[in-house]
Image (cartoon, rainbow, N blue to C red):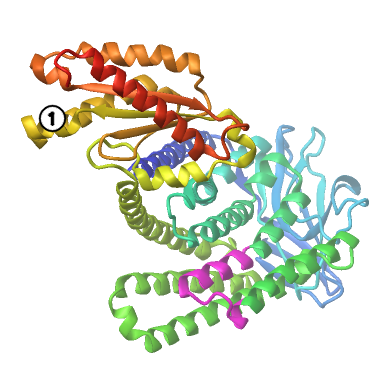
């Protein structure tokens, strides 16, 4: 129940975070409507090697022969140019140069000191100046890789801050989903490593959490908001590719756990393919031999292979283990449906990455993965709660086996294990205190076993209250108790023995003649290397002292009990 409340609190934190982010972006969205940003895609002239062409409205792509993928876009600026305005546009793996009347005013290329052919995915802002009116704005765009065409950006004119806010507003939901998944993934991983094993969490949670983190980073980076707000476009671009490549290993390990195919050669091969893909592409990028963009096809191929293998293997399991699965049909169906959802959505986005059917390359996978992760997280938490209950029952059974049912002290079996479990080199620190309830048999004979049980319970509580601070109290026989402690001395024992006797004498609500029978004899011995070979020898000496005490107590009582 504690774990359940903990996860409810975590979910509440996520929901509050999402609400705050939503409110923040909605507040900014109101400013966008009055920001004065306007589309700037009309009346451009495009120049290629094939010639010059006027476009009333710029197209999305302009076909260009491979190896010469560069275009020049020209536009005459308005007469009343406002100096606070900028011409903003987004480019993906393209170099950009901007000129006003032949004078270079903007440049975006890969830094010379960095091993990269591309500046990454960038937002470009050409700042307008007074005196630019009626001058010609020329923007040169060159592909960093061969695509067969040049992607023409969408231009926006207005204050740079307004353009940024407008883009943030457009990407609000995608950003919220990405950040929410990141928080969820971190909670899953942290929960697993802090309390997961102790509380019997499902093993798949750790891999699901890692996958969620990597996917959330990739999804958030694909919104381009981090690069837009903080710059460092090339670093953001590399983080995007690395997080995508890192997804393969956790999803493969997750499938191994869900399908119970640990040790399978096929899935181990997929896992190693993911590891090698990341390692090799990292080395190639580090030395400048190949960019991540040029090796991402390997990741896509591996991911698609994993998706198809998971679907085929899932269907095979349904057929081969249909009798075994019948008892847990709902859970198996959820697993297979979840894997199909994530597989199909990522496949669609992988195709879109190459053919550009739509702008956002994480549209379907972002939604599919969110549904997949939420469904499986809920299912795994449900499984984990069942395992927690089983663990609690097992712990309860173990405690019952270790405890004396009447006094709730540890029993003789645990006493023997603890006694022999003390290391030889620490024996000098220990002392043994023995206790015995005098006249228990007479109490049973004269007043019944109910009163005898009351005597045992009362005596055990007094012993525990007085001596419990020094160590564990054990019930080792019907009327015998023992304390093994490394914190008690002979002097402390003598002081506590007097306290115990006074406590017993002060009991109220008991007939005087019954009270005369209630005595607790005790004896203490500290381990002595010259006299004791082990703690059992020390225990025998404490037992002898206890019987001397027992004899003395009986002689003091009137009536010779």
What residue is rendered at 81% in x and 39% in y?
132
Placement of 434 over or under 179, stated as above or below: above
Residue 254 included in the magenta stretch of the image = yes
Q: Nearer the viewer, residue 57 or 504?
A: 504
Provide residue 521's location: percent of width, then percent of height. Answer: 31, 23
Q: Residues within 10 Å of mark 1 (few under 14, many from 20)?
A: many
373 left or right, relative to 97: left
Placement of 187 over or under 515, stated as above or below: below
Residue assigned mark 1: 443
Q: Magenta span covers which residues?
A: 247-267
95 left or right, relative to 180: right
SS for callout 1: helix
Residue 127 included in the magenta stretch of the image = no
Q: Nearer the viewer, residue 466 or 343?
A: 466
Q: Nearer the viewer, residue 11 or 142?
A: 11
What residue is rendered at 29% in x and 47% in y?
400
What residue is rendered at 46% in x and 58% in y?
370
Q: Quadrant of the C terminus?
A: top left
Provide residue 289's location: percent of width, then percent of height. Answer: 89, 67
Task: Write down the quadrant of residue 451 in the picture.
Answer: top left
Placement of 495 over or under 145, stated as above or below: above
Provide residue 389's location: percent of width, then percent of height. Answer: 32, 53
């Amino acid at each position: 129940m504690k774990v359940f409340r903990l996860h409810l609190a975590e979910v509440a934190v996520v929901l509050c975070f999402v609400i705050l982010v939503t409110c923040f972006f909605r507040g900014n969205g109101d400013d966008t409507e009055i920001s004065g940003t306007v589309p700037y895609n009309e009346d451009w002239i495009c120049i290629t090697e094939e010639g010059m062409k006027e476009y009333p409205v710029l197209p999305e792509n302009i076909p260009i022969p491979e190896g010469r993928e560069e275009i020049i876009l020209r536009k005459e600026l308005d007469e009343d140019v406002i100096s606070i305005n900028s011409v903003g546009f987004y480019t993906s793996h393209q170099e950009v140069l901007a000129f006003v009347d032949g004078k270079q005013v903007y440049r975006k290329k890969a830094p010379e000191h960095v091993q990269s052919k591309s500046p990454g995915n960038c937002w470009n802002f050409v700042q307008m100046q007074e005196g630019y009116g009626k001058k010609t704005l020329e923007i040169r765009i060159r592909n960093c890789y061969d695509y067969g065409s040049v992607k023409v950006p969408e231009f926006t004119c207005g204050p740079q801050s307004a353009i940024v806010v407008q883009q943030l507003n457009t990407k609000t939901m995608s950003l919220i989903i990405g950040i929410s998944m990141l928080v969820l993934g971190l909670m899953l991983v942290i929960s697993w490593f802090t309390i997961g094993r102790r509380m019997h969490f499902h093993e798949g949670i750790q891999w699901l959490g890692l996958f969620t983190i990597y996917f959330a980073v990739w999804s958030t980076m694909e919104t381009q908001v981090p690069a837009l707000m903080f710059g460092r476009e090339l670093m953001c671009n590399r983080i995007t590719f690395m997080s995508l490549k890192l997804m393969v290993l956790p999803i493969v390990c997750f499938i191994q756990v869900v399908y119970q195919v640990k040790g399978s050669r096929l899935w181990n091969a997929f896992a190693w393919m993911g590891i090698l893909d990341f390692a090799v592409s990292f080395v190639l990028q580090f030395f400048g031999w190949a960019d991540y963009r040029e090796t991402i096809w390997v990741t896509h191929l591996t991911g698609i292979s994993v998706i198809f293998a998971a679907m085929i293997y899932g269907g095979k399991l349904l057929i081969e283990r249909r009798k075994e699965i019948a008892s847990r049909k709902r859970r198996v169906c959820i697993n297979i449906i979840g894997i199909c959802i994530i597989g199909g959505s990522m496949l669609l986005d992988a195709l879109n990455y190459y053919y550009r059917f739509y702008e956002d390359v994480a549209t379907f996978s972002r939604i599919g993965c969110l549904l997949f992760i939420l469904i499986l997280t809920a299912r795994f938490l449900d499984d984990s709660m069942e395992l927690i209950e089983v663990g609690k029952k097992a712990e309860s059974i173990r405690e019952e086996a270790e405890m004396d049912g009447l006094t709730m002290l540890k029993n003789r079996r645990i006493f023997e294990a603890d006694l022999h479990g003390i290391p030889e080199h620490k024996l000098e620190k220990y002392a043994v205190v023995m206790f015995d309830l005098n006249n228990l048999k007479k109490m049973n004979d004269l007043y019944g076993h109910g009163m005898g049980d009351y005597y045992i319970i009362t005596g055990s509580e007094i012993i525990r209250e007085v001596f419990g601070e020094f160590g564990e109290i054990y019930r080792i026989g019907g009327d015998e108790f023992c304390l093994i402690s490394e914190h008690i001395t002979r002097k402390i024992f003598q002081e506590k023995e007097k306290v115990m006797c006074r406590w017993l004498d002060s009991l109220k609500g008991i007939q005087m003649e019954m009270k005369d029978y209630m005595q607790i004899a005790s004896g203490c011995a500290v381990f002595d290397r010259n006299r004791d070979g082990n703690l059992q020898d020390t225990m025998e000496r404490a037992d002898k002292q206890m019987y001397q005490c027992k004899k003395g107590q009986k002689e003091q009582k009137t009536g010779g009990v």
